[in-house]
Image (cartoon, rainbow, N blue to C red):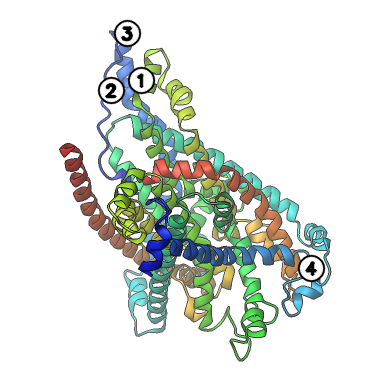
Amino acid sequence: MTTTAPAREPAVRKDPPGAARGPRRRTGRLRRVTLPYLLLLPALILELLVHLIPMVIGVVMSFKELTQFYIRDWGTAPWSGFDNYKVSVDFDAPVGEALLHSFLVTVVFTLLSVGLCWLIGTVAAICMQDTFRGRGLLRALFLVPYALPVYAAVITWVFMFQHDNGLVNHVLHDQLRLTDKPSFWLIGDNSFIALLTVSVWKGWPFAFLIVMAGLQNIPKELYEAAALDGAGMLQQIRRITLPSLRPVNQVLVLVLFLWTFNDFNTPFVLFGKGAPQAADLISVHIYQASFVTWNFGTGSAMSVLLLLFLLVVTGVYLALTSRDRTAGSSRRRKETADV
Amino acid sequence: MSETLRTARVPRSPMAPPRTFLWTRRIFLTLLTGFVLVPVYVMVSSSLKPLADVTGTFHWLPSELTIRPYIDIWSTVPLAKYFVNSLIVAGAATVCSVVIAVFAAYAVSRYSFRGKRVFTVTVLSTQMFPGILFLLPLFLLYVNIGNATGIALFGSRGGLILTYLTFSLPFSIWMLIGYFDSVPRDLDEAALVDGCGPLGALFRVVVPAAIPGIVAVAVYAFMTAWGEVLFASVMTNDTTRTLAVGLQGYSTQYDVYWNQIMAASLVVSVPVVAGFLLLQRYLVAGLTAGAVK
């Protein structure tokens, strides 16, 4: 996402030498002006239809008193001003309190999940940097959780987390005798651990994939030089690998954060429509506020608040990392200039 | 530790990793393989168990091997129909999304025009919106369009295709811009000199040179559409239901046919996983060029 932010070099195209001059040149210029817009048109129309217009509708809806009575003809629903927002952020009342709780759960969950995904993915990618027997097979295996359709993978975890006939309780209770009695994993406090496990299992291969791709860009000579200077394995990782991966990691962490924070599929398949308190992620919470309790206005207000939060976080993150990056790239430029 | 390391390192080249690293690596990778594979093993082994085996206490091995679940899955729910629906929806969404992304990325990569920055920033920022934000408005919009024009978008495959193809579009455009930028400009300019139109240059020079990126984008788009649950569960009806919703049919009020669920999960996963593993080289190459640079 950030890679496109710096302005691309202006694509001022010179006329190809030998191109026809005169009237054809004018139509050529006209085409050159309109062509990019024509090429963008399908993408633009779709973005408008499926993302931007619904977003505007969503914002409008958040200012309306939209209950099931008005859903058929939502334009006629009475305006309610900021009422929906007031209800959403009144943290002393039940609706606001539940929203705040859900928000905090989501933040903690996202931080843990992204952190673990990044850590496991990076360690695995570094472990598999040089060739050994079975590396190709292992790499393919590691990508399986990422490739599996969400519902098929998560439903398998649901089976494993079953109270009576699940693998998890069988191993923890029957085989290892770690618990006094079989635990519940899909309700109660343990559901947070269950959700985190599934999310990390599903998410770390993406980090692995990206870091692996990033590692290929680090010149071997750097390591050779460091090894000759007597730098050990860990020092090489700290001084060469991690700094070189920084631009990759910046994009990766942002993408992982947004995907995890917005993830609906995993908690929805794991818990169904009503997630347990301890694992009540925000997207399922909003889904429930809108579709189960039929309060679409409040649901929309919550969505808009969520969007504002994501905008702020992403904006701050991009501002921080891009300053970093320009500093880094100017330093790099200087180094190459010195050479 | 340093003593053993030093003695161990004597016959080795300075580039070779120390022994302790090799052992840590072995242990870490073994544990990780276990973590990754246990659910896969459960899926495969449970799909070969009789119903009595999956309703009682879990056992690692089936009491008897049976392929019965694989026969029953097709009649318990109309799995074949869901399969076809998923295939149509994901396939169409992938093809459209790739074509549209190729055009858009070509425009951004090769031309300068007013509003270019606004376009890229807008498209990319839609990537960060939670899907739940669009669900209800899109539902209302599709119903309204349907009432006004008679085009049935809600509940139809068309509506789902339209929705899904925009899910992968931002990421696809972004990756392809990076990929097209890495194709030397001289190549398509030479094609223009040789008398190709801009589209000719795109299809004869830029697209062939960017095939890994395009395959990567296609894989991503297909996986996104094949795995989506939220919109599939709200915007489909009995005839257009996709696999994402269809698998819920194996649990009734009285019984949960876990062996059939596992068999069906495996059947719907195999095509995607096989395709993904076959094309993963392209995906890594595509991500390297599109996301990493």
Would you identify the image quadrant in which residue A100 lies? bottom left
Camera-nearest label, 2 or 3? 2
Residue tagged 2: A13
The chain ID associated with circle 4 is B
- What's the distance in space between the residues labelled 3 and 4, CA to CA? 74 Å
**SS category of the residue bearing label 1:** helix
Q: In this view, does A177 lie to the left or right of A59?
A: right
User: Label 4 amino acid?
Assistant: Lys
Image coordinates for residue A309, horizontal then vertical, percent: 32, 65
**In the rendered image, the vertical position of residue B52 relative to residue B15, given as above or below:** below
The residue closer to the viewer here, A273 or B217, is B217
The answer to the question of whether label 4 and label 1 lie on touching residues, with beta carbons closer than 8 A, is no
Image coordinates for residue A21, horizontal then vertical, percent: 28, 8
The answer to the question of whether label 2 and label 4 lie on touching residues, with beta carbons closer than 8 A, is no
| Number of marks in picture | 4
**SS category of the residue bearing label 2:** loop
Residue tagged 3: A20
Q: Which of marks 2 and 3 is nearer the N terminus?
A: 2
User: Label 2 amino acid?
Assistant: Arg
- What's the distance in space between the residues labelled 2 and 3, CA to CA? 15 Å
Name the outermost residue toward the bottom: A180
The chain ID associated with circle 3 is A
- Classify 10 Å Cα crowding around label 4: few (below 14), some (14-19), many (20 and above): many
- What's the distance in space between the residues labelled 4 and 1, CA to CA? 62 Å
Residue tagged 4: B49
The chain ID associated with circle 2 is A
Residue tagged 1: B189
